[in-house]
Amino acid sequence: MRRPIIVVFLSLLMLALPAAWGAERGALFKISGSGHTMHLFGTMHVGLPEFYPLEPRIAAAVKDASALALEVDLLQDPAKLGAAMQAHALLAPGKPGFQDRSPAFRKRVEQALKKAKIDPAAVARFKPWLVATTLTLAEYAAEGYQAELAVDIKLAQMARASKVPVIELESIGAQFAMFDRLGAEEQWKFLEESVGMMETGKQRAEMRQIVDAWGTADKAGLDAVAAKVENDTSVSGKFMQKVLLDERNGPLADKLAALLVKQDKSVAAIGVLHLIGKNSVPALLRARGLTVERVY
């Protein structure tokens, strides 16, 4: 299961969902401790018009929240994305890109880019992990999924409309830096695996699995997604589990626990993959002595 988590890219959706007024989607938890409560909601980082309006309980919780905590707040400062790109996502001048790999590999990448209607020259300076992410984003966009309709962004807009403060739990620079920790050959393998997933249609199948589960708040379906992630032994799969999930879940749980002590009726919204599996954020919060109730 491979799904890069960069908020603007990440990745995750396929198949249009039927419109439903305020349908339950994703996963919603109620966290209690220190005499305070918090709603914790699992999001998708891209979206469709059919995702909205959100289910009344989460919509009401955001409207009346003391604060909304997101992984990153992309509505604040677009320059942060550009700085992160320069620092972590672009090859150094003169450093070889995919054009300098084997002819067979270059052909596969170029075919994938052309299929996605991306000029290979436009991504020539991208590091391999960003080429893979760009291809993934283009595949989602071809099916109608839009970054500007990401659940995180919609929640931030709702919060600001109600004058609710928005808090960042991480930064876009830190998220990009995680991908930059992959060694050069690991990054090429990451790209190769991504292209292979696209060629076989396996990536689209995995996208269907998660969007179907998220779109219907299907607990068993989300648990199946978590099991796939935990058992994926590919380079990108192990990176996803160990770095993008396990390594981040502890600090996310710590920050949410600290927010719960300070504020009552806060709302936290993070990628749904952080809320499922053995080392999920809800499991870590429960281990810290907090009361964790799954609403759906």
Image (cartoon, helix red, strand yellow):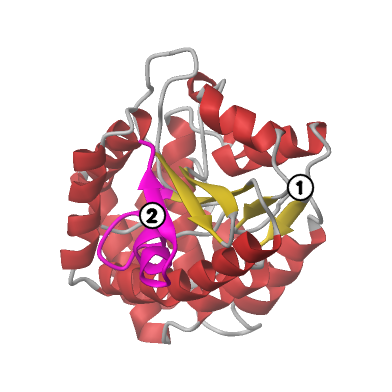
- Mark 2 and mark 1 lie on one chain; the one further toward the N terminus is 1
- Rate crowding at label 2 as few (under 14), some (14 to 19) or many (20 or more) other CA atoms within 10 Å: many
Name the secondary structure under disc 2: helix
Name the secondary structure under disc 1: loop
Residue 251 x/y as whole percent:
52, 75
Residue 217 visible = yes
Amino acid type of the residue that numbered disc 2 sits on in the rendered structure:
Leu
Residue at 72%, 57% (x, y): give it: 167
Residue 90 visible = no
Q: Which residue is mark 2?
A: 275
Residues shaded magenta: 272-296
* Quadrant housing residue 58: top right
Between 210 and 179, the one lying in front of the other is 210
Residue at 26%, 44% (x, y): give it: 222
For the image shown, how many numbered marks are present on the structure?
A: 2
Left/right of residue 116 with respect to residue 233 in the rendered view: right
Residue 250 x/y as whole percent:
45, 74
Amino acid type of the residue that numbered disc 1 sits on in the rendered structure:
Leu
Please tell me the numbered disc located at residue 75: 1
Between 237 and 118, the one lying in front of the other is 237
Between 123 and 140, the one lying in front of the other is 140
Please tell me the numbered disc located at residue 154: none
Task: From this view, report whether residue 213 is shown above or below residue 93.
Answer: above
Q: Per the image, is 276 magenta?
A: yes
Residue 190 x/y as whole percent:
34, 70
Callout in the foreground (2, 1) = 2
